[in-house]
Amino acid sequence: MPFVGEIFSQLKAAADVTILQEIRDGQIAGVTGGELLEMIRKARTFLAAQGLSKGDRCGLLAANSIRWIAMDLAIMAEGLIVVPLYFRQAPSELVAMMRDSTPALVCCGDAGLRDAIQQNWAEAPPQFLFDEIFKGVEGVTLDRLQVGIDSPVTIIYTSGTSGEAKGVVLTAANVGFMLGCTSERLDLLMSGRSGHDRIFHYLPFSFAASWIAMMTFLKRESLVTLNTDLTKIASEMPAVAPDYFLNVPQLLERMRRAVDEQLSQRGGVAHTLYSRAKSAWMRRREGKPATGDGFWLWLAGALMFPAIRKRMVGPNLKALICGSAPLTPETQLYFRMLGIQVLQVYGLTETTAICTMDDPRHVECGRVGPAIPGSEMRLAENDEIVVRGPHIFPGYWNRPQQTAEALRAGWFHTGDQGEIDSAGNWRIVGRIKNLIVLGSGHKISPEAIEDEIAQNLAGAQVVVVGNGRGYLSAIVTGNVAPEQVQSALDAANAQLPHYKQVRAFHLRPDPFSIENGMLTVNGKLKRDLIAARMKNEIEEMYQVKQAV
């Protein structure tokens, strides 16, 4: 049975149980499994009346909501292909994706999204609002699934860090295999726990990892509470009191800084205890304990850390799950100090979101866990990670040449550099295409250096450049003073060989963002575009340094 049918069976079993909730304006509204099935029936009835053919594409443009989930499942159940679109993305980029995927229709969450399409695409296919889709038709039942085991079910567009976004086709078989892997790993995490998992979810469903997580939660009959206002995550998260939830490194870094800032402003005994315990924890991790460290850690563990945990994430948390980008070991260790386990996941859209997952019983800080069961991972030329298994996508939509480049001899070439330890745990070093080749011939992955510098510049973005040059330089964004940047560079350089040291920098007050086009929709740097737009500033760094 395709995974959609498995989810429907679980919804029928939970017909009278609340499985989904969303928070809007401080109010929580939820649906049972039976009520969600009724919403799906209404959406399927609407789609069936549109005269679509199996395999037609349907755009889905809306913010996270219960209706988004119902619409997604309805489209797949009808044998159609969902094209999820990020509602905060620039209209011109959305139109480019729709022109590429040629949807037969677009389902929009609100009139503003529909109007943005019409203003930017005169020849757009029909657009329908959720309000009209879910108004319902009485007396129609559509129980038979139109989706097959190997049918394509979605086209998810990649973030496009180095150019035009590509549509990744995923099949029901890809997704079904992955849901088995994710559910088994959550079984390990929740071992010994009875009852339904409680989950808080805020990441956009248009991203592959978020979508796979949501499908997993439905399969497990979990109680999922959806955040609909990102500015309220900090207050809603502890109120929901989840067992676990999916995160990106940016949020965890923000949570860490918030605790530091609050206790710094509070001052007094609390700040003294916190600071001494943090210092003791880091010395212990570095193997350089000092007299009294055990006392400060014991005291903070008894009086302070439990209160921080409860205020931050509620009383029930088993673990934070983190993906999308590498998490710094320092942040992972920080949460471990508080008694919060952070489990990392690594993958790409092309691998149905996941290649590796931390085993909650054996977490190696700074690594992303072993390869998922049933798949294979190894290192190829330039230490590139290549993968094969049932989760590998069949190809890019209408891009046979790029598909052939990515899929070679049965292996998917991820473009990521990695390393593996004796226990089978992987570490992601950086992107092959991001490699900086100095004039000396040294090949350098910039990501680790950027993270090291940024650790001492709270909230700043760091981009290391230097391709073809004699040394590395950095672009630093944010409200930081030059002497702070130099201090951060000195601290990082002290741990690096001469050819990896950053010897010049340029301060840019404005951050790189999605709005100014310098970041992808999931927060990754568009390095080529940054280098092109800041060509003069980069050139100036090298001229000034050479003149000195």
Image (cartoon, rainbow, N blue to C red):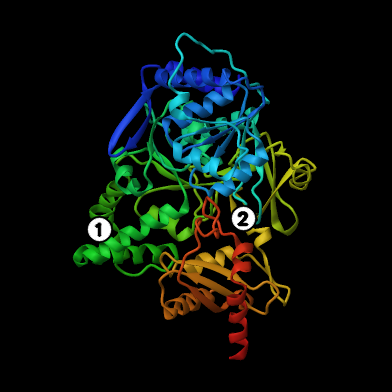
Q: Nearer the viewer, residue 14 or 514?
A: 514
Residue 371 visible within the image: no
The C terminus lies in which quarter of the figure?
A: bottom right
Q: How many marks?
A: 2
Q: Nearer the viewer, residue 441 or 143?
A: 143
Q: Nearer the viewer, residue 416 or 344?
A: 416
Residue occupying the point 40% across, 16% down: 15
Read off the residue under disc 2. 161
Quarter of image, res 20: top left
Residue occupying the point 70% across, 39% down: 397
10 Å neighbourhood of mark 1: few (<14), some, or many (≥20)? some
Residue 215 located left or right of residue 414: left
Residue 528 visible within the image: yes
Question: What SS does tag 1 mark?
Answer: helix
The amino acid sitting under disc 2 is: Thr
Q: Residue 270's spot in the image, x, y percent?
A: 22, 62
Q: Residue 170's spot in the image, x, y percent?
A: 64, 34
Q: Residue 302's spot in the image, x, y percent?
A: 25, 53
10 Å neighbourhood of mark 2: few (<14), some, or many (≥20)? some
Question: What SS does tag 2 mark?
Answer: loop
Query: Between disc 2 and disc 1, whose residue precedes?
Result: 2
Q: Nearer the viewer, residue 282 or 443?
A: 443
Residue 511 located left or right of residue 242: right
Distance in Å between CA atoms under marks 2 and 1 = 46 Å
Read off the residue under disc 1. 299
Relative vertical location of residue 48 with respect to residue 98 in this rendering, above or below = above
Quarter of image, res 296: bottom left
